[in-house]
Image: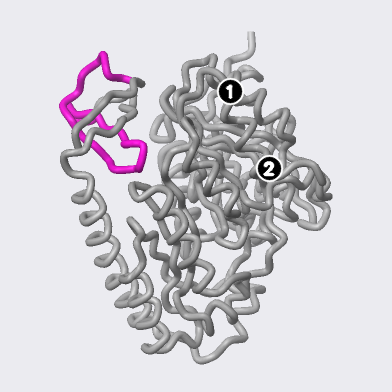
């Protein structure tokens, strides 16, 4: 009788990657693989990589070295965005057996049937232009919350970004399919769904990237509102130019969509936004924030911002800092610009010194901390609904209010995966 093979996964990067890793894991378990923790001994290790972080290459190499020391006879498979962008580079890392590009990662089971330890640096990839089709994915770490992928790829050409090269053109699931998945997740006990994608607001393009005239992100959220079992939805991230007034108004009246938006800004300077090839100006961003806050004063608003983009002067950075300081937002995700091969940003001069980039990052992270403290303080004493997660950390449990304030309290089993009224 053949021994059951085991597999362990490690994910680098975004919520979309986590949802896809979870799906790959379920695929292999259905094929008879035993899932193990990444720190355990396993027959196969799969690393799902990211291209956004500066040290994708470094992280990947470190993880492969760890596996080599711990389990030299095991197979190592690398997939994800970095695998699509730099397959040859990754295949040359000692210990890597297989590199799967964007079109092949969901065929992992058939690749593993053929793969042996004698295989070294095998590549199964294709040009990103040839990648089409939509692979639905969702993550289930515990039953409380799941990240549901509804869109993939991007047709935007931001000058700093490699995602279109790593994930291909914008394409989506159909509304009917998403609703069916949400219903199944609701029946399995999941309370909250986070809608994820590369460019969520562009939802409505079919698996081939062609626009389905009758489908849009606004129509999707309307349909999801009526799904039984699911009590909460969050929109993970949506471009300001695609966040329509209709969507904002809908969320403000919804019983299920949480008062929480995450809206990428990237820079508070119109000059830098133009060099970044973003599709809006800061004035539009400010209008969106003002509308959200007028309809939902309690709404949490998160902001992505990049510091140290080429040619960002002290004056440009001050524009960004002052803009964000005055803006009624709740927290910032701050990214330090890092060079990416084959991006237009490499042609923009002058380059901002790395130490200056780090100083600017620190300044905005401090501002973010103060923003979140202020936002939390504004709700002190209010009763808000908290969904507590189903796991214990050092005798404590955590949950989030509807408007994304993190709550920590001594563990109580009866509160696991429950929505509880809570005085902030």
Q: Is disc 1 surrounded by few (<14), some (14 to 19) or many (20+) residues within 10 Å?
A: some
Name the foreground residue: 46 vs 390.
Answer: 390
Residue 33 visible in the shown view? no
Which dot marks residue 227?
1
**In which quadrant will I find the C terminus?**
top left
Residue 168, x across and y down, in percent: 73, 55
Q: Residue at x 52, y 32 (%)?
A: 139
> Range of the magenta residues?
393-416
Vertical comparison of 60 with 314: above or below: above
The image quadrant of residue 157 is bottom right
Left-right relation of 22 to 158: left
- The secondary structure type at the circle numbered 1 is loop
Residue pointed to by mark 2:
119
Q: Nearer the viewer, mark 1 or mark 2?
A: 1
Count of labels shown?
2
Name the foreground residue: 316 vs 149.
Answer: 316
Residue 163, x across and y down, in percent: 63, 59
Left-right relation of 24 to 133: left
Q: Residue furthest front?
A: 294
């Amino acid at each position: 009788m053949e021994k059951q093979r085991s597999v362990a996964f490690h994910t680098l990067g975004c919520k979309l990657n986590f949802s896809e890793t979870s799906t790959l894991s379920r695929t292999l378990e259905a094929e008879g693989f035993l899932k193990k923790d990444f720190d355990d001994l396993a027959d196969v290790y799969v690393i799902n990589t990211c291209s956004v972080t500066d040290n994708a290459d470094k992280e990947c190499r470190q993880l492969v070295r760890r596996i080599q020391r711990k389990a030299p006879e095991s197979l190592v498979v690398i997939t994800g965005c970095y695998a699509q962008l730099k397959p040859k580079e990754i295949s040359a890392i000692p210990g890597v057996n297989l590199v799967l590009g964007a079109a092949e990662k969901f065929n992992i089971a058939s690749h593993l049937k053929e793969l042996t330890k004698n295989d070294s640096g095998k590549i199964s990839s294709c040009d990103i232009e040839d990648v089409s089709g939509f692979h639905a994915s969702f993550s289930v770490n515990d039953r409380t919350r799941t990240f549901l992928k509804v869109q993939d790829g991007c047709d935007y050409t931001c000058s700093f970004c490699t995602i279109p090269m790593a994930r291909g053109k914008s394409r989506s699931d159909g509304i009917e399919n998403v609703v069916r998945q949400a219903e199944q997740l609701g029946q399995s006990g999941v309370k909250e769904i986070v809608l994820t994608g590369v460019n969520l607001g562009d939802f409505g393009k079919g698996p081939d990237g062609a626009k389905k005239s009758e489908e849009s992100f606004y129509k999707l959220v309307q349909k999801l509102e009526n799904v039984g079992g699911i009590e909460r939805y969050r929109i993970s991230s949506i471009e300001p130019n695609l966040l329509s007034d209709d969507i904002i108004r809908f969320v403000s009246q919804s019983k299920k969509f949480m008062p929480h938006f995450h809206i990428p800004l990237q820079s508070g300077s119109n000059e830098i936004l133009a060099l970044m090839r973003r599709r809006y100006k800061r004035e539009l961003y400010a209008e969106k924030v003002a509308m959200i806050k007028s309809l939902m004063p309690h709404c949490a608003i998160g902001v992505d911002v990049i510091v140290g983009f080429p040619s960002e002067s002290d004056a440009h950075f001050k524009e960004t800092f002052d803009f964000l300081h005055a803006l009624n937002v709740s927290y910032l995700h701050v990214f330090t610009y890092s060079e990416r091969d084959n991006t237009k940003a490499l042609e923009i001069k002058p380059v901002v010194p790395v130490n200056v980039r780090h100083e600017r990052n620190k300044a905005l992270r401090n501002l973010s901390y103060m923003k979140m403290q202020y936002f939390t303080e504004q709700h002190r004493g209010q009763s808000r609904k908290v969904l507590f997660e189903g796991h214990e950390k050092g005798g404590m449990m955590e949950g989030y209010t509807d408007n994304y304030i993190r709550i920590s309290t001594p563990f109580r089993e009866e509160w696991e995966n429950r929505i509880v009224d809570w005085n902030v």
